[in-house]
Image (tube, grey):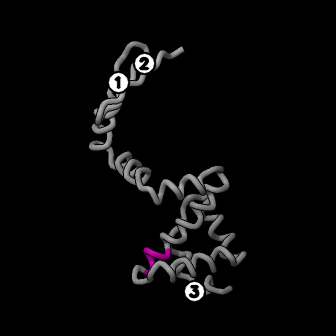
Amino acid sequence: MTDEKNKTTENTSIITINDNLINFHEEGKKIYNNSKFMRSITNIMENPEFKALFDEYFNSIEDIKIFLLFTKVYNSITKQFPEMNGYEKIAIVKRFISNSKTRKLICDEINSISINNKLVKNKSLFIK
């Protein structure tokens, strides 16, 4: 069994695990500075608005898939129509998701992890 003792100073968390002192502040700082991915994760997870969204909508794999579906469609629309405002984008997302044909197309694309701008290039997808 691991013996863990926590010590917190003003800017540093030091934990003893198996008689090894680990300075997570310094270790994390190095990771943050050397990994764009980890820096992005840290920045977004420290954002209060995203944390609230995460806490509310990331409770099951189904929730995560729905979040992914909406955000991938929103992002595709943003890339295809950068001049659109957020209200216009969510109106299109809602139409895509509400339409069984486009919803199936989107789900198929999500399942293959290859959604792209072809969703918004086809004007027939705007049918209610």
Say if residue 48 shows up in the picture: yes
For the point 53% across and 66% down, the residue is 72
Q: Residues within 10 Å of mark 3 (few under 14, many from 20)?
A: few
User: Where is 103 relative to 122, above or below?
Assistant: above
Secondary element at image label 2: strand
Q: Position of residue 118 (x, y in %)?
A: 53, 75
Mark 1 or mark 2: whose residue is earlier in sequence? 2
Q: Nearer the viewer, mark 2 or mark 3?
A: 2
For the point 56% across and 58% down, the residue is 113
Q: Is residue 107 magenta?
A: no
User: Where is 81 relative to 69, above or below?
Assistant: below
Mark 2 or mark 3: whose residue is earlier in sequence? 2
Q: Which image quarter: residue 111? A: bottom right
Q: Position of residue 109 (x, y in %)?
A: 60, 64
Image quarter in which the N terminus is found? top right
The amino acid beneath tag 3 is: Lys
Q: Is residue 79 magenta?
A: yes
Q: Residues within 10 Å of mark 1 (few under 14, many from 20)?
A: some
Q: CA distance from mark 2 to mark 3?
A: 59 Å
Secondary element at image label 3: helix
Q: Give the magenta-colored segment's residue range.
A: 77-81
Mark 3 or mark 1: whose residue is earlier in sequence? 1
Asked if the residue under mark 3 is in contact with the one under mark 2, i.e. CB atoms within 8 Å, the reply is: no
Q: Position of residue 117 (x, y in %)?
A: 50, 73
Q: Which image quarter: residue 47? A: bottom left
Q: CA distance from mark 1 to mark 2?
A: 7 Å
Q: Which residue is mark 2?
A: 17
Q: Which residue is mark 3?
A: 123
* Labelled disc at residue 22: 1
